[in-house]
Image (spheres, rainbow, N blue to C red):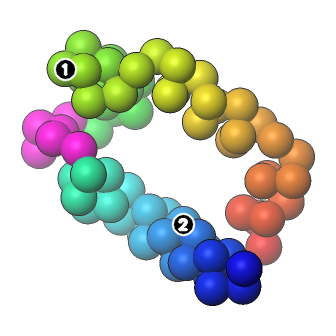
Amino acid sequence: MMGNVNDLMNMYQQMKANPMQFLSRRFNIPQNMNDPNAIIDHLISTGQVTQGQINKVMEMRNNPMIQQLMNK
């Protein structure tokens, strides 16, 4: 269990340090795209993610337990 938490925190730190590099490991995002809403629209329109997946991430982001964990 602790390994999973450490892995999650490492991923969070990497994403926080360089979001585009982190996202580009998994998704095809044009280099010149840096607006978060444009990136989300691109990922949905190209079928790389679904609106449901975006909704799930937004729910997680708004979860008080997740917010507390990420603010440490």
Q: Is residue 29 magenta?
A: yes
Q: Which mark is residue 12?
A: 2
Q: Are marks 1 and 2 in contact (CB under 8 Å)?
A: no
Residue at 52 percent across and 19 percent down: it is 52
The spot of residue 44 in percent (x, y) is 32, 19
> Which quadrant would residue 39 be assigned to in this image?
top left
Q: Spot the residue most to the left.
A: 31
Residue 1 in the image: state x and y as whole percent.
Answer: 72, 80
Residue 61 is covered by the magenta coloring: no
- What residue span does the magenta drawing correspond to? 27-33
In the picture provided, is 25 more to the left or to the right than 17? left
- The residue under the point 59% across, 23% down is 55
Q: Position of residue 5 (x, y in %)?
A: 68, 76
- Residue at which label 1 appears: 46
Evaluate whether residue 65 shows in this view: yes
* Residue depicted at 62% across the width and 30% down the height: 56
> Could you tell which of marks 1 and 2 lies nearer the N-terminus?
2
As shown in the figure, which amino acid type bears the numbered disc 1?
Thr
Identify the residue at image location x=59%, y=36%.
57
For numbered disc 2, what is the local secondary structure? helix
Above or below: residue 33 compared with residue 41? below
**Can you say which quadrant of the picture contains the C terminus?**
bottom right
Image quadrant assignment for residue 63: top right
Q: Amino acid at mark 2?
A: Tyr
Q: Is residue 54 left or right of residue 39?
A: right
In this view, the residue in front, 32 or 9, is 9
